[in-house]
Amino acid sequence: QKEVEQNSGPLSVPEGAIASLNCTYSDRGSQSFFWYRQYSGKSPELIMFIYSNGDKEDGRFTAQLNKASQYVSLLIRDSQPSDSATYLCAVKRQGGKLIFGQGTELSVKP
Amino acid sequence: KAGVTQTPRYLIKTRGQQVTLSCSPISGHRSVSWYQQTPGQGLQFLFEYFSETQRNKGNFPGRFSGRQFSNSRSEMNVSTLELGDSALYLCASTYIMGGARNEQFFGPGTRLTVL
């Protein structure tokens, strides 16, 4: 079992819809959680971080964390074609090491 | 503030050679992490340096090494290159603060091709 798991996708949603990206992790001691967006040929760009249970909203993005279920998700409201990218979930373990999932490819169709 | 810079951006080497990649973190950031990204394995952690000391290490062979200088700039070295070392090498810098935050900001990467 991988330490951080994501569905590889591709996840295809129509423009204007809500895109839901999910991530599970195995280390219960994990402290903080990050979502990165990576466009093809580019480096990852941080879009959200969350470290306490519940929801955190930033514009069209909402990160949700459930530590009991070891589950973190990212919701993108009013999806735009420019949101088409690979979304990487990253989990910071105790000791500071950041572990990435394989990423979910999102495609937003006009 | 200038972002994370990496040099060179592209590199072509042959098997058996060695290579040195450089990373300059964001001004004020003292932690530098290195990652290898390949289509098959995704983003894999190589090592992290903080205040010139290696603080964390991933599961890579000893051919992969790194160091950090007093100005926080970091280098990573790969010796005896293999075809499987072809990858995008990413550097990320972090401003270490107390608590659980400490977001990492990535540089543009160095694309290494081993022939």
Image: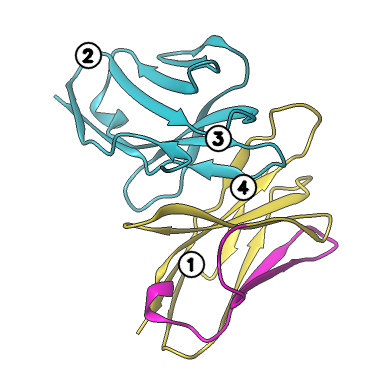
Chain colours: A cyan, B yellow
Within 10 Å of disc 1 (Cα), the crowding (few <14, some 14-19, many 20+) is some
The alpha-carbon separation of the residues under discs 2 and 1 comes to 36 Å
The alpha-carbon separation of the residues under discs 4 and 3 comes to 23 Å
Left or right: residue B52 compared with residue A22: right
Q: What kind of residue is marked 2?
A: Gly
- Residue B77 falls within the magenta-colored stretch: yes
For image coordinates 41% across by 42% down, the residue present is: A1
Most extreme residue toward the front is A1
Left or right: residue A22 compared with residue A65: left
> Which residue matches tag 1?
B9
Q: What kind of residue is marked 4?
A: Gly
The alpha-carbon separation of the residues under discs 2 and 4 comes to 32 Å
SS for dot 1:
loop
Within 10 Å of disc 3 (Cα), the crowding (few <14, some 14-19, many 20+) is many
Question: Is label 2 on the same chain as label 4?
Answer: no
Q: Are marks 3 and 1 in contact (CB under 8 Å)?
A: no
Q: Are marks 4 and 3 in contact (CB under 8 Å)?
A: no
For image coordinates 51% across by 36% down, the residue present is: A90
Highlighted magenta segment, given as a residue range = B58-85
> Which residue matches tag 4?
B3
Q: What kind of residue is marked 1?
A: Arg
Q: Nearer the N terminus, badge 3 or badge 2? A: 2
Kindly identify which numbered label has been placed on residue A91: 3
Q: Quadrant of residue B85?
A: bottom left
Chain that bears disc 1: B
Residue B62: x and y in percent read 62, 75
Q: Nearer the N terminus, badge 4 or badge 1? A: 4
SS for dot 4:
loop
